[in-house]
């Protein structure tokens, strides 16, 4: 009945805050949790490690009462409990910050928070409490903003705030730091350590193993729905934990020999854009040049203009920018749509896979056709050429080791990592001269992430200019040659990766610009016009 | 307890089974309704669904009724695929009949072989013109095409009524509100002697094949599907939604206009205040019954045509009201939409605990 981690944890005699005993949960076609056992003591920060699809989310949903286990027991403070719903879970004192936000877009921040509370009597009191928590934990958030106007990062803040409001006894955090700056992460960790000192148990789920190492006292590792081991993260290296997660040796991306950079292939000059969205971020005077063979990272907290930058580069927004403000291989393209930009050899991978980078209801074959039909000549006389279309998809599947039943499978049936490999592969096989890729490994398992990183490095080695927009600083440090930081729609000057420290990037992410770069106060959100020419 | 459980992948089997299931359930509910009306349900269903097609003339009539339904539904389905909800095919049909029929009336003593082809063209233009108005309003002012196309239907039918009561009334027609009969050169040739099956039926088959090619094999059909399923992905690769709105509305309007012309130049032979028993609306059901797929629409069109024939026969032999036709059509659409849930979900019986034991 008890797994390795459970046996190891049986040492203490005091009842655990939560003990999971033999939990099993099956979905059609997969066993998501297979006889999982472990325990979390009060005041302990416990890491749950595992790749995407290892069963972490399912387990969390069972603990939070969203799903019911097929078999097994949950023991809360020594007593077996049945958790029928999230309401029950909150009543008991379980708080959860979901990885995928469960927010109502058309309601305000405060209303969303109120919805997740078990009893709200007075909105004014709640507002006061929210503002207090925000202040205490450094999570700035306007309670009256509508959620649909918020960035990913801000949405996550709502989740964190609404959990902290309930004084939980067990706080579960699912990938909470992906939208925070290093300084904010440190601040969150202080908060979590304080909570733990107050006796709150914390179940911490993250891919970022050095964070786990810095924060957690114990870890349970899941693979394929089973507990495969436990460890003390403080005594392990990030590499050894990663290998435990994926069950094989981890190969660091091979950066090859120092690449020679060629001519500028992607040239953005003084790009300023007013966002169409009511609360979107305006782009202010963006400048960057990416040379052939160079991988440039765009760091920054989500919602600081990265989406707008991506859309402007991909040509998704029909805008009034000067034609010269974006050049691909020397050609002015800012007035072109996506198809003409692609014809010039540019390729784009958006952050969101389902519905943006791929059509979930369509087959992989059709999804390959989606962006490649011109460059790969998959259409003739207005008709789809079936055979080359299918073999292009097959080629992607083979080259990038996409795990699927075949090119006829619907894109939506693939796991996040596999679909991302397919989308990245689709663009890389088109042999682009410029690749702009947003959050290349967001929500992707370690195996797929390292494959994607390697593919980007190989692509750059062939002379492509690659722009990586990422919130994951590890990723930027792992693959980029240079870095720029976005904050409030502005961009810092490019810096070679070798010359810049993680603290400096963190400060830039927080909006503190170099004195020489910009003298205007950072809280000024005035129109673009006022900024032009100052940077 | 009965629960719906999401499927990992859409069930292909249910895509085809759900219309069959819907038809079956319609028959059951229809039978119950007949029983409540004091008729023997089996007799009534027999009269409604079998009697109309138990002879060759009946089958030919089925094709005559199915022709406009299929032509219109193929056009509508392309729009529906792209999330363009043209509900006003009835109006576009009427406008097509007015444009094409107007030409026949203007040349009412013509014997030219060019008259009929010219009527085809004008009929299609008339329908497309009427659909262009919602397209313009949608793309320029973001006005919902469901409302605009629907409202324009009433404008079109009233306009037709005005014409046949006034300027286009047959001067030799004893003041009846109808136009001159079209000249022979403006009538569709019968392609099967002794029936009313006309050239339009052959065109309908052609439309099905062309629609299938367009939807499944062409780049523009691919764009339609992407725009409908994932608008953001469409924007990402530069498929313009506005262009799809124009394309599908114009094409759907043109086909509806053509179908309208076929009615007045075929079975009717002149303009009347009423030229369609709601083909433009029924075609919406046909499009969904046929899974928005041209080949499916061919079958869907035949089934809905049967409800028209059955309704007529039920009036004559059973003394049931004509509303029975609309009733059956509504029930069918209702069950169809309900059964569609099964392509994405499966039904599970029993509680979660029971399922746990089997897992």
Image (cartoon, helix red, strand yellow):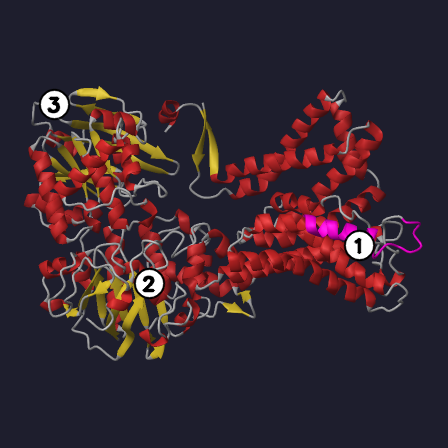
Q: Residue at x 93, y 49 (%)?
A: B174
Q: CA distance from mark 2 to mark 3?
A: 57 Å
Q: Is residue A479 above or below residue A168?
A: below
Residue B57 appears in the figure: yes
> In x, y percent, where is residue A331?
36, 79
Residue A104's image quarter? top left
Name the residue: 16% across, 65% down. A520
Q: Which residue is mark 3?
A: A15
Marked residue chain, label 1: B
On the rendered structure, is B265 left or right of B230?
Answer: right
Q: Residue A187: x and y, percent?
A: 11, 46
Answer with left or right where residue B48 lies relative to residue A213: right
The front one of B292 and B84 is B84
Mark linked to residue A318: none
Marks 3 and 1: same chain? no
Q: Earlier in the sequence, mark 2 or mark 3?
A: 3
The secondary structure type at the circle numbered 3 is loop
Q: Which residues are magenta?
A: B154-175
| Element carrying mark 2 | loop
Q: Residues within 10 Å of mark 3 (few under 14, many from 20)?
A: some
Position of residue B258 relative to residue A56, above or below, is below
Q: Looking at the rendered structure, which numbered label has been put on residue B163?
A: 1
How far apart marks 3 and 1 lie (CA) works out to 88 Å
Q: Quadrant of the C terminus of chain B?
A: top left
Residue A491: horizontal and vertical position, in percent?
A: 21, 65
Q: Which residue is mark 2?
A: A274
């Amino acid at each position: 009945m008890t797994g390795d981690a459970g046996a190891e944890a049986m040492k203490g005699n005091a009842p655990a805050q939560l003990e999971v005993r033999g939990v099993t949960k099956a979905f059609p076609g997969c066993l998501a949790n297979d006889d999982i056992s472990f325990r979390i003591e009060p005041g302990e920060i416990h890491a749950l490690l595992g790749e995407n699809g290892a069963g972490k989310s399912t387990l969390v949903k069972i603990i939070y009462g969203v799903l019911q286990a097929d078999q097994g027991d949950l023991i809360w403070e020594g007593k077996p409990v049945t958790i029928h719903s999230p309401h029950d879970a909150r009543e008991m004192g379980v708080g959860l910050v979901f990885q995928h936000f469960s927010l109502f877009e058309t309601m305000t921040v405060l209303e969303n928070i109120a919805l997740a509370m078990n009893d709200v009597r007075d909105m004014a009191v709640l507002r006061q409490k929210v503002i207090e928590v925000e202040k205490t934990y450094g999570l700035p958030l306007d309670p009256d903003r509508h959620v649909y106007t918020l960035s990913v990062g801000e949405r996550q803040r709502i989740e964190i705030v609404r959990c902290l409001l309930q004084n939980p006894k067990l706080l579960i955090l699912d990938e909470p730091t992906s939208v925070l700056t290093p300084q904010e992460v440190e601040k969150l960790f202080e908060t979590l350590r304080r909570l733990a000192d107050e006796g709150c148990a914390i179940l911490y789920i993250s891919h970022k193993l050095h964070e786990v190492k810095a924060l957690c006292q114990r870890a349970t590792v899941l693979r394929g729905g089973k507990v495969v081991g436990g460890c003390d993260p403080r005594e392990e290296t990030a590499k050894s934990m990663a290998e435990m997660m994926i069950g094989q040796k981890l190969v660091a991306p091979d950066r090859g020999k120092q690449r020679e950079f060629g001519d500028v292939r992607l040239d953005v000059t003084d790009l300023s854009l007013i966002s169409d969205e009511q609360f979107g971020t305006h782009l202010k005077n963006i400048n960057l040049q990416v040379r052939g063979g160079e991988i440039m990272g765009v760091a920054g907290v989500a919602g600081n203009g990265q989406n707008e930058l991506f859309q402007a580069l991909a040509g998704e927004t029909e805008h009034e920018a000067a034609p010269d403000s974006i050049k691909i291989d020397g050609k002015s393209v800012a007035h072109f749509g996506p198809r003409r930009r692609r014809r010039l050899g540019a390729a784009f991978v958006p952050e969101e896979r389902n519905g943006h980078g791929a059509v979930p209801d369509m087959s992989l074959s059709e999804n390959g056709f989606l962006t490649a039909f011109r460059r790969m000549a998959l259409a003739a006389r207005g008709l789809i050429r079936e055979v080359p279309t299918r073999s292009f998809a097959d080629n992607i599947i083979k080259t990038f080791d996409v795990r699927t039943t075949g090119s006829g499978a619907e894109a939506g049936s693939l796991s996040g990592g596999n679909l991302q490999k397919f989308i990245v592969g689709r663009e890389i096989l088109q042999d682009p001269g410029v690749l702009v890729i947003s959050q290349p490994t967001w929500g992707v398992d370690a195996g797929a992430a390292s494959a994607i990183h390697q593919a980007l490095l190989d692509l750059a080695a062939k002379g492509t200019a690659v722009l990586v927009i990422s919130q994951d600083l590890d990723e930027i440090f792992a693959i980029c040659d240079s870095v720029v930081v976005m904050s409030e729609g502005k961009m810092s000057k490019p810096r070679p990766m070798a010359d810049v420290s993680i603290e400096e990037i963190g400060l830039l992410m927080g909006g503190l610009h170099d004195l020489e770069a910009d003298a205007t106060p950072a809280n000024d959100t005035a129109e673009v016009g006022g900024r032009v020419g100052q940077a | 307890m009965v629960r719906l459980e999401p499927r990992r992948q859409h069930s292909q089997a249910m895509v085809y089974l759900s219309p069959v299931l819907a038809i079956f359930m319609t028959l059951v509910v229809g039978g119950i309704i007949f029983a409540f009306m004091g008729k023997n349900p089996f007799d009534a269903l027999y009269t409604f669904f079998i009697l109309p097609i138990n002879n060759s003339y009946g089958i030919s009539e089925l094709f005559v009724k199915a022709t406009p339904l299929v032509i219109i539904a193929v056009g509508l389905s392309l729009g529906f695929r792209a999330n363009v909800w043209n509900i006003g095919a009835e109006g576009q049909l009427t406008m097509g009949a007015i444009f094409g029929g107007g030409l026949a009336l203007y040349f009412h003593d013509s014997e030219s072989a060019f008259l009929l082809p010219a009527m085809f063209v004008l009929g299609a233009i008339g329908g497309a013109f009427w659909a262009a108005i919602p397209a313009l309003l949608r793309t320029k002012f973001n006005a919902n095409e469901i409302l605009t196309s629907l409202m324009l239907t009433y404008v079109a039918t009233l306009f037709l009524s005005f014409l046949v009561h006034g300027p286009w009334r047959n001067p030799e027609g004893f003041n009846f509100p109808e136009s001159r009969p079209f000249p022979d050169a403006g009538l569709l040739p019968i392609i099967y002697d002794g029936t009313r099956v006309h050239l339009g039926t052959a065109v309908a088959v052609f439309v099905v094949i062309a629609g299938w090619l367009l939807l499944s094999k062409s780049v523009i059909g691919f764009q339609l599907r992407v725009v409908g399923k994932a608008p953001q992905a469409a924007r990402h690769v530069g498929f313009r939604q506005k262009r799809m709105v124009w394309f599908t509305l114009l094409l759907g309007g043109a086909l509806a206009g053509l179908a309208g012309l076929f009615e007045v130049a075929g079975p009717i032979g002149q303009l009347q205040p009423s030229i369609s028993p709601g083909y433009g609306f029924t075609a919406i059901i046909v499009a969904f019954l046929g899974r928005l797929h041209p080949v499916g629409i061919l079958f869907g069109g035949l089934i809905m045509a049967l409800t028209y024939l059955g309704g007529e026969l039920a009036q004559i032999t059973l003394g049931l009201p004509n509303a029975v036709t609309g009733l059956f059509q509504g029930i069918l659409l209702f069950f169809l939409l309900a059964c569609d849930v099964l392509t994405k979900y499966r039904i599970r019986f029993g509680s979660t605990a029971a399922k746990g034991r089997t897992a």
